[in-house]
Image (spheres, rainbow, N blue to C red):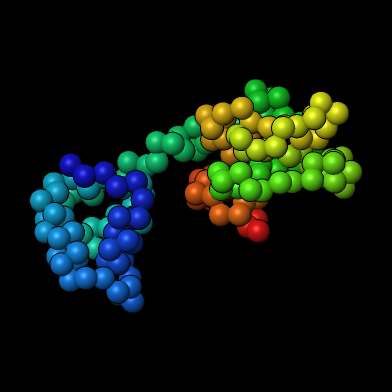
């Protein structure tokens, strides 16, 4: 059994895009291994449509979902989730998810002045420390465990190019890239 939760392995070899230059031996190796697969676990039926031919497999394709997203996609009531997470109901909730490299610094005072009455900002774990005086407009997440639940409750995700943008899109949230 092989489980591919994303098409990244196939993409890196170039099997999903004939324009990508790859070595013939890499392609042959991936396809040879693909023929030994009996069940191909994929995130979505669409991923199966791409991966099965790329791997040259006749395996049974099973869409198993994305386990990391189960908490987000299983949210029947965003209002209840917002209440559980102690998020404001009267403002849009914006989640800031930059790549975890520590170089992004937001001007939280400017956020509070310009948008604090209309939008509530949630910072990714490891982001800026939020001063007490701004906690009515900004919150920092303590751990990565909370990010998935925030994606279920938020209205917008802002990112430079975090891998989490795929999670946000899957959850049906708009994403702004900068």
- At a point 46% along the width and 38% down the height, the residue shown is 69
- At a point 64% along the width and 31% down the height, the residue shown is 141
On the rendered structure, is 132 left or right of 71? right
Tell me where residue 125 appears, x and y as whole percent.
60, 34
153 or 21: which is nearer to us?
Answer: 21
Quadrant where the N terminus sits is top left
For this orientation, the residue located farthest to the right is 113
Tell me where residue 26 appears, x and y as whole percent.
19, 64
For this orientation, the residue located farthest to the bottom is 19
Dividing the picture into quarters, in which one does residue 75 lie?
top right
Q: In this view of the protein, can residue 168 be seen by the observer?
A: no
Tell me where residue 122 appears, x and y as whole percent.
69, 37
Tell me where residue 81 appears, x and y as whole percent.
63, 28
Dividing the picture into quarters, in which one does residue 139 lie?
top right
Q: Taking 102 as reference, is 129 above or below it? A: above
On the rendered structure, is 62 left or right of 82? left
Q: Taking 178 as reference, is 166 above or below it? A: above
């Amino acid at each position: 059994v092989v489980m591919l939760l994303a098409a990244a392995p196939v993409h890196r070899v170039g099997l999903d895009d004939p324009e990508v230059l790859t070595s013939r031996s890499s392609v042959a190796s991936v396809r040879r291994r693909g023929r030994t697969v009996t069940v191909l676990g994929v995130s979505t039926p669409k991923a199966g449509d791409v991966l099965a031919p790329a791997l040259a497999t006749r395996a049974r394709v099973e869409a198993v979902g994305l386990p990391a997203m189960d908490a987000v996609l299983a949210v029947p009531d965003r209002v209840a989730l917002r209440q559980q997470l102690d998020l404001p109901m009267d403002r849009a909730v914006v989640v800031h998810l930059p790549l975890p490299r520590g170089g992004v610094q937001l001007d939280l005072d400017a956020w509070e002045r310009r948008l604090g009455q209309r939008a509530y900002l949630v910072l990714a774990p490891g982001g800026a420390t939020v001063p007490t005086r701004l906690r009515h407009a900004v919150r920092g997440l303590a751990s990565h465990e909370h990010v998935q639940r925030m994606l279920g409750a938020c209205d917008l995700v802002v990112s430079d190019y975090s891998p989490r943008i795929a999670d946000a899109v899957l959850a049906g949230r708009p994403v702004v890239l900068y």
